Image (tube, helix red, strand yellow):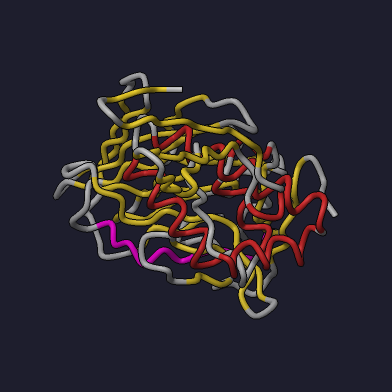
Amino acid sequence: MIIHGNKQISGIIYSRQASDGGGAVALTNIIRGPQVVFGGLEPSGRDWLWYATKAAILAAFGQTDGKAVINATNAYLNQLAASDRDKATALAGYINTYEAEDPHMIYSIVPTLGVDRWLVGNGQAYIDTGIQTKNVKVEIDAKFNILQSSANAIVGCYSGPNWFGAYDGKWSIYTASFNKANNTRGKFIVSFNESEIVATDEVGATITRSGTRTSGNWILFGQPTDTNYASASYVHAIFRDHSTNSKIRDYIPFIRNNVNGMLDLISGTFYANAGSGSFTISETPSTP
């Protein structure tokens, strides 16, 4: 019991049922003389998910697994909010906006759930980002897996006689390459000047090739002059304007109206296959 002046404050801690969001709850009573005032429920952690979002999770995952997903999501967002509340709020917004449409998208938002969700291309499918190469110095941060040995770019663009692409575990401009391990996170910066393409990897190594910049777009799973595209998969792909450090695209695998593609979390735009092939979505470890 805590006494402050003529007020006695007592607290009782109990656990909420999982169906109510779980977590510890404090019931606080303030006693003023003969009167008892109930202060109400004070959750020890915020419940970030809307009722409709939780209903969608329970419908997709079942009661037992669904409640575990809800509790793990709230725990992750509360932990994140302690250091970066704006990011936690943004992630909760994505989940509440899109979870009912594609319940497994939560794997792309909450890493502590322990599942990687991949958009997998069959060699004839690609994503046209709509990002023009001409005026933007682009930083690309992607987690990918190359599923072939041939030299089709998994991300690329075109400028004059030369192309920039990532293929076979390498980031390359025409014949010059950065060696990169397969099934890894790749990050590089690409800028187009009037007469050259300059690429820099995350440790500062730079390669340069001549080429007049054009208005061609960046694409995923290939580069714009390809007729065949890469058999590859993505967990995510983020494009930033390197000059301002602002995100241009933040792609995750997504299913809309039974169509597999990528959702840009920045704009809410869904990007379907722009090629003749098809995409599938897989998860590791596999889930029901």
Residue 79 magenta-highlighted: no
The residue sitting at 45% across, 51% down in the picture is: 91
Q: Quadrant of residue 111?
A: top right
Number of numbered discs on residues: 0
Residue 176 visible from this viewpoint? yes
The residue sitting at 64% across, 67% down in the picture is: 102
Left/right of residue 102 with respect to residue 268 in the rendered view: right
Q: Nearer the viewer, residue 50 or 84?
A: 50
Q: Quadrant of the C terminus?
A: bottom right
The residue sitting at 58% across, 49% down in the picture is: 108
Q: Which residue lies most toward the left here?
A: 194
The residue sitting at 31% across, 20% down in the picture is: 204
- When the figure is inspected, residue 44 is found, relative to residue 250, above or below; the finding is above
Q: Give the x, y percent position of residue 57.
A: 69, 61
Q: Give the x, y percent position of residue 37.
A: 41, 48
Q: Which residue lies most toward the front here?
A: 34
Q: Give the x, y percent position of residue 283.
A: 75, 48
Q: Quadrant of residue 16?
A: top right
Left/right of residue 267 with respect to residue 195 in the rendered view: right
- When the figure is inspected, residue 122 is found, relative to residue 34, above or below; the finding is below
Residue 227 visible from this viewpoint? no
Q: Give the x, y percent position of residue 234.
A: 60, 48
Q: Nearer the viewer, residue 73 or 273?
A: 73
- When the figure is inspected, residue 203 is found, relative to residue 34, above or below; the finding is above
Region in magenta? 123-133
Q: Which residue lies most toward the right here?
A: 288
